[in-house]
Amino acid sequence: RAVGPGPFAAAPPDAGRLRGEHSNQQTFTWRAGDVAPGPNVPWPARDLPPAVPSTAFHPDMLASFIDIDGGWQGVGVRIGEYLENTAVGSYATPDIAPAAKPGEPVVITYKTPGHHDPCDHLYRGLTQELDQPKVVPLLLYRVQVPNAAFPQVSGQVVQVSPVLEEIAHEHTTDGGSDITLVHDPYVAVIDDPIKPASNRLAIYALDRHPVLGGASYLYYVVRFDADREIDRVFYTNAVTIPTP
């Protein structure tokens, strides 16, 4: 139809622009052109680096099922840690805001002591030397692996995170003390579940996708180099999701 004058409204009396007259009818025939296709330039094949255990990069880079104060449950892959500053109290309790709309995820903010960049606390390999590359940029993938509850699985590899290059955070103060608020929805900063008595906070890259209760998942951490080419591929331990 040709559009008529008036506002874009779907119902009368203001639907003038949606109630124009039908246009005239035309008949045509489409034929492929005679232009020769260009040369077939093959994409250069590049071998992927071999997948190695994530513990080869750092012994604590493991996948775990985590419960963030009842606000969110799911799987995260540990990608860093740092000492908690007990002089300003415990900062491991997340601030959990309700979902904006039904069905949307909750919004969780993590309060950590001092002004810092959370990426400074990410793993840099076994030696943790500052001249070693960090685990980021990374992508997180997962694959369901067979177990007693699900002996047959598809083996499909699914991407479960965006490219993580930085961690969204904000510097502010609380009661006169400097703190850093971590706002990143794909990152959690929680009390260390591996070393609960160590006074450490652990940094996790999160899988925010739905999972099956009783299923087991193995994760791939794909790290990129400065040119955003795949540099390393790590696979984690398998994690079994608790049944409700």
Image (tube, helix red, strand yellow):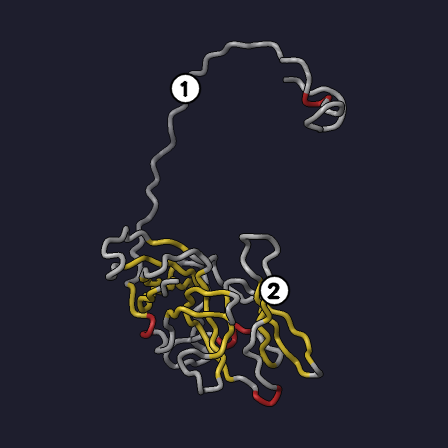
Q: Which residue is mark 2?
A: 97
Q: Residue at x 30, y 50 (%)?
A: 45
For the residue pair 85 and 221, the one nearer the viewer reads as: 85
On-image quarter of the C terminus: bottom left
Q: Quadrant of residue 90?
A: bottom right
Marks counted in the figure total 2
Instruction: Look at discs 1 and 2 and give the one toward the viewer.
Output: 2
The three-letter code of the residue at mark 2 reads Ala
Q: Badge 1, how many Cα within 10 Å: few under 14, some, many 20+?
A: few
Q: Secondary structure at mark 2?
A: strand
For the residue pair 144 and 227, the one nearer the viewer reads as: 144
Residue 198 % position (x, y): 45, 87
On-image quarter of the N terminus: top right
Please say if 142 is above or below 43: below
Q: Quadrant of residue 30?
A: top left
Q: Residue at x 51, y 71 (%)?
A: 69
Say which label, 1 or 2, has the lower sequence index.
1
Q: Is residue 162 left or right of residue 243?
A: right
Q: Residue at x 36, y 57 (%)?
A: 212
Q: Which residue is mark 1?
A: 32
Q: Quadrant of residue 148?
A: bottom left
Residue 12 % position (x, y): 73, 23
Please say if 175 is above or below 156: below
Do the residues under discs 1 and 2 have CB atoms within 8 angstroms?
Answer: no
Residue 114 % position (x, y): 61, 81
Marks 1/2: CA distance?
57 Å
Q: Badge 2, how many Cα within 10 Å: few under 14, some, many 20+?
A: few
Q: Is residue 42 left or right of residue 120?
A: left
Q: Secondary structure at mark 1?
A: loop
Please say if 241 is above or below 115: above
Q: Residue at x 49, y 11 (%)?
A: 28
